[in-house]
Amino acid sequence: MSPAGWRLTSDAEEFGREAGPCLAADPAGHTVPLTVAETVRRHGPRALGTDDARFGVWRRRADGPVEAVFVRTPPRGPLLGPMPELAARELAEALRGTGAEGVKGGEGPARAFAEAWTAAGGSWAITRRSRLYRLGTLTPPHPAPPGARRRATAADVPLAAAWMDAFAADIGTGPATDHTAHAERRVAYGGLYLWETGGVPVSMAAHSPVVAGQARVAPVYTPPALRGRGYAGAVTAAVSRAAREAGARQVLLFADVANPTSTALYQRIGYRPVADHVDIAFT
């Protein structure tokens, strides 16, 4: 009999077996846990962090169905799937002492986690708001900017890794890291695309592997000197089409609520809002 409350593991296969029905019931809401678990399963427990990834499943009653999940790729804090606030508060207690510097998830669960985490001292603040979008009818920019999409190859890994570093710095999320392995994985399964003009890459976008019928577009990056020319819209539309061609029934992406340029761009292409998320930091 499985116990009530949280069950934690570093085994991505075990997590997939236990959480499978919960994840499959809402692949869009669980897009990050799904793709993190798949990456760890394929590439090892430290593929996305400096320590072993951690997963968890929550049951309201012993031997009941899994109703909530979380993932963590240290040194990053936990990322919460959709869950009751009770589960979020219990997770804060289950993880106490692990040194998390923040939490991410839907605003209700993330706030509940933060309040429980800091109940004995400390404070918390929302540092970023993002919105999950799902692709409806794909509408590529018209007229398209000069150039064409090209699937990235191994020769593009140094440029892609540098652009991923720059993207991470731009959005200010997560610790500084070398994205070479990340770029190599995206190239290996064919999920990284460039927009080229005159044989020169000017923009980049990637999609995650297709898991449970969903794939997520990230990152989308254009160097500052090349922005405002339509390249980001063109490459986002191109990689969104590629994700569908790879078998994704749902194509998703996160956008920063504070960036009206990108959110308007994604909606013009055909993305529609699904849910809001927050990043919370502890002090």
Image: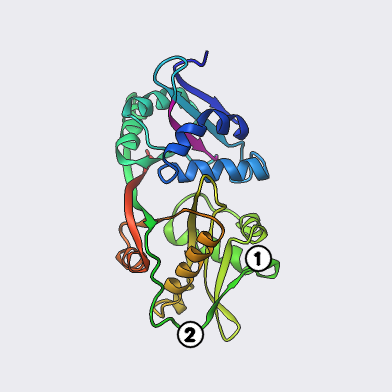
Q: Is residue 154 left or right of residue 245?
A: right
Query: Does 166 appear above or below 14?
Result: below
Name the residue nearer the viewer: 173 or 241: 241
**Distance of label 1 from label 2 (alpha carbons):** 23 Å
> Tag on residue 129?
none
- Residue 102: x %, y % from top left: 42, 39
Q: Nearer the viewer, residue 54 or 75?
A: 54
Q: Earlier in the sequence, mark 1 or mark 2?
A: 2
Most prominent secondary structure in the magenta stretch? strand
Q: Are marks 1 and 2 in contact (CB under 8 Å)?
A: no
- Left or right: 226 in relation to 178: left
Give the structural element (helix, strand or loop) at label 1. helix
Colouring chosen for the image of the structure: rainbow
- Examine the rendered structure and indicate whether residue 126 appears above or below residue 243: above
For disc 1, the marked residue is: 157
Q: Position of residue 61 (x, y in %)?
A: 41, 16
Instruction: Say which amino acid is labelled 2.
Output: Pro
Image depth: mark 1 or mark 2 in front:
2
In the picture, the quarter occupied by the C terminus is: top left
Category of crowding for the residue at label 2, using alpha-carbon neighbours closer than 10 angstroms: few (below 14), some (14–19), many (at least 20): few
Asked if the stretch drawn in magenta spans residue 189, the answer is no
Would you say residue 279 is visible in this rendering? Answer: yes
Residue where numbered disc 2 is placed: 146
The kind of residue on which mark 1 rests is Val
Dot 1 crowding, Cα within 10 Å, few <14, some 14–19, many 20+: many
Report if residue 72 lies within the magenta region: yes
Total count of labels: 2
Position in image of residue 254 (x %, y %): 40, 54
Image spot of residue 8 (x, y percent): 53, 25
Magenta span covers which residues? Answer: 66-73
